[in-house]
Image (cartoon, coloured by chain):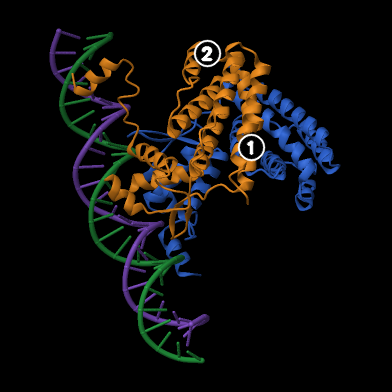
Chain colours: A orange, B blue, C purple, D green
Amino acid sequence: MSAIEAAAAKQGPPSQIARPSGLAEEVYRRIRADIMSLRLPPDTRVSVDSLARELGVSQTPIREALSMLEANGLVSKKHFTGYATAPRMDRAQLDELFEFRLLVEPHAARKAAEAMAQSDMDSLGAVSGAHAPSHDGFADMDTEFHKLIAQGGGNHLIADSLARLHIHVHIFRSCFRSEIAEEAVHEHDAVIKAIRSRDGAAAEAAMRRHIERSYGRLRDFIRD
Amino acid sequence: MSAIEAAAAKQGPPSQIARPSGLAEEVYRRIRADIMSLRLPPDTRVSVDSLARELGVSQTPIREALSMLEANGLVSKKHFTGYATAPRMDRAQLDELFEFRLLVEPHAARKAAEAMAQSDMDSLGAVSGAHAPSHDGFADMDTEFHKLIAQGGGNHLIADSLARLHIHVHIFRSCFRSEIAEEAVHEHDAVIKAIRSRDGAAAEAAMRRHIERSYGRLRDFIRD
DNA sequence: GGATCAAATATCCTATAGGATTGCCGGACG
DNA sequence: CGTCCGGCAATCCTATAGGATATTTGATCC
């Protein structure tokens, strides 16, 4: 028995340890994480050579990862000039993003209240805690909260769309080192409570109010 | 004839890529068109080598194009096995797709009725004509119809999401060589009429009914 | 001092060769 | 007859070299 098999057998389902999903995927996640942590700030040029040297891999997986990031709107490519991280959202983009969220996410919350699996329901209770000391801690909790609800609706398209947009919200919020909003935690709890009691209408309303409030908090940072 | 065209002609058939302005983008559109025209049917393996030889370009732009297609859900990659076009939608995916459209597209129609530019309004009248003899002609008209309305709402995120999903609808419909639905043209006209008279509520209702009917027509082809 | 043009640099884009890994096919063995 | 095992083919992944282009820099001229 190889070491990998032993580790997999020890951890149970081997779907997480044995991940031969390809090097490009790994590079993709790494660069995406660097963008989300502002290690690569918005509107910053990223060169294929530098990344290849820094990550110790060839140029090919770097190119594939950057192409996927481009398709997801996190970087842009200019011919014969190179890649650059997407510029920070302006007012118009923020408006569009929240119009979309306000349209989709309350619906997802309603469906989650009606059809969410019990296991996800338990996980949802785990992110309800008020223990979110650091900024990154709150951000991760917020990401998990919205991801669970989006997935709870059972529609992969909705979940993927919201996850893709949430990355941009995360970057925007990190740019301004936004204070941890105590209100947001309470709004989250209201949504969770409605979902746990299987009240679709209440969940939809609570989620709508949460997004509207969140929009108001973020909009203050921009004056374009 | 330019030097580039001469070199291309010397190397093989004229179906090659000759424009040196973003080769990966060009390859991306070519492969996407091949998928939409069923020249590459669903669940078909596509190899980097074959495409490189067929299009007369190197492997690198092929890889970039396939990575973008993978990010858009049109192909999938298995490690050390190769790329393959996405399998045909099953019942569950069709349900999810139309749930999403039903959620987003009527809203887009309402906003289009309220805010669409006059130039796009004129273009919208152009696709209203009953002259859609061929199957491809109707498909193009349908694509243009939904694209104009999605863009008319003024929200790029909504427009992009709907465009991405519409590709899958197009593939699904092409798979079954669906007859041209006379009803669809009438439903389109109803939406257009509501938008031209700037009646947001009527446009939203007409679009909702159109999508529901369209869903019913497509659902008949699947019995999983 | 400001503007213009040309050379230099950095980067991307392409092409080709070679190593590594997976899935498949045919034959041997129980 | 079923199962296991080893070679074969296909494919991906990496590395390197060379051509093409945009950006920058510096010198020159007005």
Q: Is residue A132 left or right of residue A183?
A: left
- Find residue A108 and report its image quarter: top right
Residue B68, horizontal then vertical, whole percent = 47, 43
Choose top left, top right, bottom left or bottom right for residue B63: top left
A172 on left or right of C13: right
**Residue at image coords 70%, 40%:** B146
Chain letter for mark 1, please.
A
Query: Percent x, y for residue B66?
Result: 44, 42
Local SS, label 1: helix
Q: Tag 1 or tag 2, which sits nearer the N-term?
A: 2
Label 2 and label 1: CA atoms lie apart by 32 Å
Count every numbered label the image shows and give the total: 2
Which quarter of the figure is the C terminus of chain B placed in? top right
Q: Which residue is mark 2?
A: A117
Residue C15 found in image quarter: bottom left
Does residue B99 sit above or below B116 in this rendering? above
Q: Which amino acid is tagged 2?
A: Ala
